[in-house]
Amino acid sequence: MEAKHERDMAAEADAAAFREALGETVNISVKKERGSAAFLPCIEATSAPAALNGIAVLIREYAAMVGLSPVSVLAVLATVIAMPTIRKQQVEKQEEA
């Protein structure tokens, strides 16, 4: 009986999140000029959750495009994001030695 109640609560929360998402606006764009290493991102959203949902959609779409799971894409993304910090820490350790 409690498991059914938990499922009902989860379904109700999902429905509420869906209704809220219908009222949100998100615009995500990224520009990169040829010859430049800089990316110019722009995220415009009516709320932080809306922006995060937009990013999640991009990750799922990219995963489908390359034939990977979204979790695999996130793992690679986490590595790419963390790599500059890891390299900086390695250089700092070498300089201290």
Image: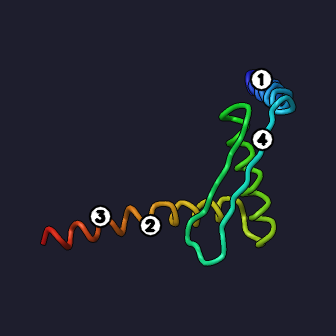
Going from the N terminus, do you reach mark 4 or mark 2 first?
A: 4
Crowd rating for badge 1 (residues with CA inside 10 Å; few <14, some 14–19, many 20+): few
User: Hey, what amino acid is under mark 1?
Assistant: Met
Q: Which mark is residue 90?
A: none
Label 4 – label 2 distance at C-alpha: 29 Å
User: Hey, what amino acid is under mark 3?
Assistant: Gln
Is label 4 or label 2 in front? 4
Is label 3 or label 1 in front? 3
* Residue placed under numbered mark 1 in the picture: 9
* Residue placed under numbered mark 2 in the picture: 83
Residue lying farthest to the bottom in this orientation: 35
* Residue placed under numbered mark 4 in the picture: 26
Q: Residue 80: image x %, image y %?
A: 52, 66
User: Hey, what amino acid is under mark 2?
Assistant: Met
Label 2 – label 3 distance at C-alpha: 10 Å
User: Hey, what amino acid is under mark 4?
Assistant: Val
Which is more toward the observer, 68 or 47? 47
Residues at discs 2 and 3 in contact (Cβ within 8 Å): no
Q: Residue 51: image x %, image y %?
A: 70, 41
